[in-house]
Image: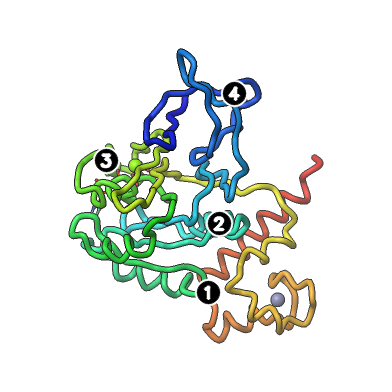
Amino acid sequence: MYTVVTQEGQTVKCFPRGKLKQNGALYIGDFVDIVLDKEGIIENVRERKTQLVRPFVSNMDGIVIVLAPTPKPDMMLVDKLIIGATENGIPPIICVNKADMQGADGIAQEVADDYKEIADILVISTHTNQGIDLLMQKIKGKFICLAGQSAVGKSSLINCILGENKMKIGELSAKCDRGKNTTRHIEIITIDDGTKIADTCGFNKLEIPLFDPAVLSTYYTDFDEYAKKCKFRCCNHYKESDCGVKNAVECGDIAIGRYDRYVRLFAYVESRWNKRYD
Ligand SMILES: Nc1nc2c(ncn2[C@@H]2O[C@H](COP(=O)(O)OP(=O)(O)OP(=O)(O)O)[C@@H](O)[C@H]2O)c(=O)[nH]1
Ligand SMILES: [Mg+2]
Ligand SMILES: [Zn+2]
């Protein structure tokens, strides 16, 4: 069952009709046509402006990727979220949350080194309100979707913005430095200024779709400028010689961490692609 908000601002519980019952037919964020009988029925989905599979949201104007000193940041997950966002033309904002905690400065520096060319970066704290006004300015009037590991503070961010404890907040498992997946469904919250934010379920792992490894570097727009200097036009910036991207890594223009993860992901995407008919 879905909750649909009508143009008049009413909330209606709706069941999907026919084909829309299939898993994955409806995204959170869809504009739908409904009929009101004894209960609401979703009849049709309007064309989507943007969409993502993880998180499963459509029509967003931006994605806010949240990370924090705890749980330990998974930069590969950030890379994968940015790949999805880039593929779907959705601009990313990265929020380093829990700025009040020790270690936040180091994480903020690493994030700036790796992503300053491709994302807006903000350092925030939902506990002290640091950076929250700036974030609100950046997303004003837009529909944005939160994404990130479990327990980085996505739901806390919504509570902080609303000034009330609407969303359920979880804690970190002391044993394994992992979140407890507190948020179990995706919900869109509307703020007074018209901004809409989708709270989503945190992931501990994110799989990327199967694609040709040659496509991977097209999602690394921070490499574009340097790739112009590669000797081979179809350079994958991997095992090739005379590679502009590898030179940029050596000069410090591309962060080594970001490039190392690219290489690891390339090898993974390639091995999966080679086995696609097995
Ligand atoms: N120190 C500090 N802790 C924070 C901050 N923001 C959130 N937390 C804590 O982080 C923990 C997880 O917060 P949640 O908001 O539930 O995290 P989430 O990202 O929604 O997690 P999932 O719903 O599992 O994906 C809670 O214990 C919060 O109190 C912050 O700015 N500083
Ligand atoms: Mg949550
Ligand atoms: Zn190259």
Q: Decide which of tag 4 and tag 2 comes sooner along the chain.
A: 4
For badge 1, the amino acid type reads Ile
Q: Disc 1 beta carbon < 8 A from ligand 3? A: no
The residues tagged by marks 1 and 3 sit, at their Cα atoms, a distance apart of 35 Å
Instruction: Using residue 193 as the reference point, say whether residue 262 is left or right of it.
Output: right
**Element carrying mark 4:** helix
The residues tagged by marks 4 and 3 sit, at their Cα atoms, a distance apart of 30 Å
Total numbered labels placed on residues in the image: 4
Q: Which residue is mark 2?
A: 85
Q: Which mark is residue 169?
A: 3
Instruction: Using residue 7 as the reference point, say whether residue 53 is left or right of it.
Output: right
For the residues labelled 1 and 3, say whether their Cβ atoms are less than 8 Å apart. Answer: no
**Element carrying mark 2:** helix
For badge 3, the amino acid type reads Ile
Where on the picture, by quarter, is residue 22?
A: top right
The residues tagged by marks 1 and 2 sit, at their Cα atoms, a distance apart of 22 Å
For the residues labelled 4 and 1, say whether their Cβ atoms are less than 8 Å apart. Answer: no
Q: Quadrant of the C terminus?
A: top right
The structure residue drawn at horizontal position 23% and vertical position 64%, both measured from the top left corner, is 130
> Alpha-carbon neighbours of circle 3 within 10 Å: few (<14), some, or many (≥20)?
some
Q: Which residue is mark 1?
A: 256
**Element carrying mark 3:** loop
The structure residue drawn at horizontal position 74% and vertical position 80%, both measured from the top left corner, is 241
Q: Which mark is residue 21?
A: 4
Which of pointers 4 and 3 indicates the residue nearer the eye? 4
The residues tagged by marks 4 and 1 sit, at their Cα atoms, a distance apart of 46 Å
Residue 276 location in percent, x, y? 77, 44
Instruction: Using residue 231 as the reference point, say whether residue 99 is left or right of it.
Output: left
Residue 244 location in percent, x, y? 67, 82
For the residues labelled 3 and 2, say whether their Cβ atoms are less than 8 Å apart. Answer: no
